[in-house]
Image (tube, helix red, strand yellow):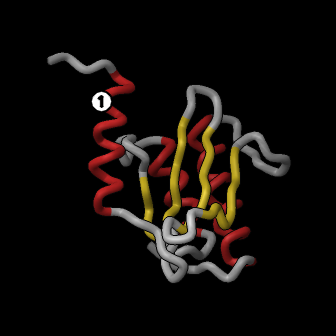
Amino acid sequence: MSLNKSERRQRIKYRVRKIVSGTAARPRLSVFRSNKEIYAQIVDDVNGTTLVAASSREAGVTGTTKIETAASVGKLIAEKALKAGIDTISFDRGGYLYHGRVKSLADGAREAGLKF
């Protein structure tokens, strides 16, 4: 059985989501990466609500490369989360490898004060 790229990522995503879950005390930072943009949201899975969201399409996000932009999005989501009273999260890489833009976003969020 041969899987294409999106089916393979979906399987990895389900495998990760079996383990990583967000609660009100420790919500989940979910990452979505498209070819052009990167999106992040902090989710409470118990209530099924998105608490904070940020993306590379927002004003104030800077960076000349996609990796720099991802780091800027990480800092932005951390600032919004800290303002909302969230300081500890679990990281959900969304089926992507923890490398490149995903790692850069996580490092940016850590640098701005989120703990995970």
Which corner quadrant holds the C terminus?
A: bottom left
Vertical side of 107 occupied by 90: above or below: below
83 over 96 or under it: above or below: below
Q: Residue at x 35, y 34 (%)?
A: 9
Quadrant in which the N terminus appears: top left
Q: Is residue 27 left or right of residue 97?
A: right
Q: Give coordinates of residue 40: x percent, y percent.
A: 60, 52
Q: Amino acid at mark 1?
A: Arg
Residue beneath disc 1: 8
Relative placement, left or right, of 57 versus 115 is: right
Q: Quadrant of residue 36?
A: top right
Q: Residues within 10 Å of mark 1 (few under 14, many from 20)?
A: few
Viewer-closest of 52 and 33: 52
Q: As drawn, which residue projects farthest toward the right? A: 59
Q: Is residue 111 left or right of residue 8?
A: right
User: What residue is drawn where x is 29% and y is 62%?
Assistant: 19
Measured along the vertical axis of the image, is residue 87 above or below residue 41?
A: below
Please tell me whether mark 1 sits on a helix, a strand or a loop.
helix
Image position of 84 with respect to 33: above or below: below
**Direction front: furthest residue:** 47
Residue 21 in percent (x, y) is at 40, 66
Q: Nearer the viewer, residue 47 or 54?
A: 47
Residue at 31 percent across and 18 percent down: it is 4
Q: Residue at x 80, y 46 (%)?
A: 58
- The tally of labels here is 1
Image position, residue 11 (x, y; %): 29, 38
Relative depth, front residue between 83 and 103: 83
